[in-house]
Amino acid sequence: MTREAGFSLVEVLVALALISGGLLAIATMSVTSLQSVDRSGEETTALILGQQRMEWIRNQAYDSTALTAGTTTETLNGDYAGYTRVTLIVDDTPIADVKRIDVSTTSPSGRFVRLSSFMAE
């Protein structure tokens, strides 16, 4: 009696199931990775927009009208459509003749970045 070389149907089906499971896991990880990259990109853009605003404020004179206490909300458009930037300036905090500056930027998906600084006279 001769035995033929090769794989049985059961062996082929088991191998196919294992390969399919591995490919499905890789596909799932790819989707998750792409979502993480997208979120990271939004956070990075929000951080850059916040830093841009903070640097602009730091370049103003202490008694400038741009540094009047209060809250300013900007809804950005163009390349940054959907981003919102809120600037809060508080006088005499934490001590007299010091302004606290908070810049908060929100991305279109709701990711949030806040920068804080102080400016003395």
Image (cartoon, rainbow, N blue to C red):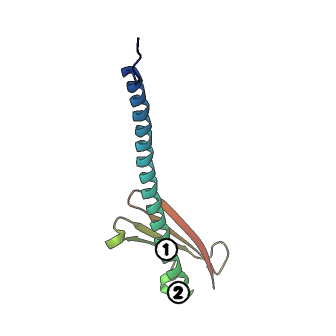
Q: Looking at this view, is 65 or 52 the one in front?
A: 52
Q: Quadrant of residue 62?
A: bottom right
Q: Where 12 sits versus 110, above or below?
A: above
Taking the view exactly as shown, the residue that stands out farthest to the right is 95
Mark 2 residue type: Gln
Element on which disc 1 rests: strand
Residue 84 at x, y percent in the picture? 40, 66
Taking the view exactly as shown, the residue that stands out farthest to the left is 78
Q: Quadrant of residue 91?
A: bottom right
**What residue is rendered at 39% in x and 30% in y?**
16
Mark 1 residue type: Gly
Q: Looking at this view, is 71 or 115 the one in front?
A: 115
Residue 108 at x, y percent in the picture? 38, 60
Residue 5 at x, y percent in the picture? 41, 23
Q: Which numbered circle lies on residue 111?
A: none
Q: Where 69 sits versus 2, above or below?
A: below
Q: Nearer the viewer, mark 1 or mark 2?
A: 2
Q: Where 95 sits versus 39, above or below?
A: below
Q: Is residue 62 left or right of residue 108?
A: right
Query: Pointer 1: what residue?
Result: 70
Q: Where 31 sits versus 108, above or below?
A: above
Query: Pointer 2: what residue?
Result: 60
Residue 54 at x, y percent in the picture? 52, 76
| Quarter placement of the C terminus | bottom right
| Quarter placement of the N terminus | top left
Q: Quadrant of residue 6?
A: top left
Q: In this rendering, does residue 55 appear at all?
A: yes
Tell me, yes or no, whether the two marked residues, 1 and 2, touch with CB atoms within 8 Å: no
Element on which disc 2 rests: loop
